Image (tube, rainbow, N blue to C red):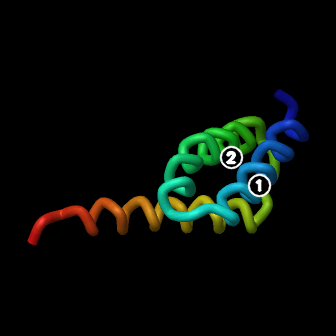
Amino acid sequence: MTNEDLLHRARSLEASILGADGAVRMALRPEFSRVVDRLRQNGAAVPGRLRRLEAALVQDAVEEMFDNIPV
């Protein structure tokens, strides 16, 4: 895939993630992260909104982990 293809896929996933609820967001996170990682590996500039979305998804995943810990 070219960087343009990867960027297009990342934007498509971004739209899907932003329109989804928690479970679907978490299901799309691994693919979104892989696409963003490939962009970085190829030396492409990753737009700030995609970096922020990735960070938000990681934060959601961490919170989800701690929400399921019995007290």
Badge 1: few (under 14), some or many (20 or more) residues near its Cα, within 10 Å? Answer: some
Mark 1–mark 2 contact, CB under 8 Å? yes
Instruction: Report how many numbered discs are placed on residues in the image.
Output: 2
Q: Residue at coordinates 9% horizontally, 72% vertically from top-left?
A: 71
Q: Nearer the viewer, residue 41 or 2?
A: 2
Picture coordinates of residue 66, whole percent (x, y): 26, 66
On the image, numbered disc 2 is attached to which residue?
Answer: 36
Residue 21: horizontal and vertical position, in percent? 56, 64
Which residue position holds label 1? 46
Q: Amino acid at mark 1?
A: Val
- How many residues crowd mark 2 within 10 Å: few (<14), some (14–19), many (20+)? many
Amino acid under disc 2: Val
Residue at the extreme left of the image, as rendered: 71
Helix, strand, or loop for circle 2? Answer: helix
Disc 1, SS: loop
Residue 37 percent location from the top left of the image: 64, 42
Percent of width and height locating residue 31: 61, 41
Q: Is residue 6 above or below residue 47?
A: above
Real-space Cα distance between discs 1 and 2? 7 Å
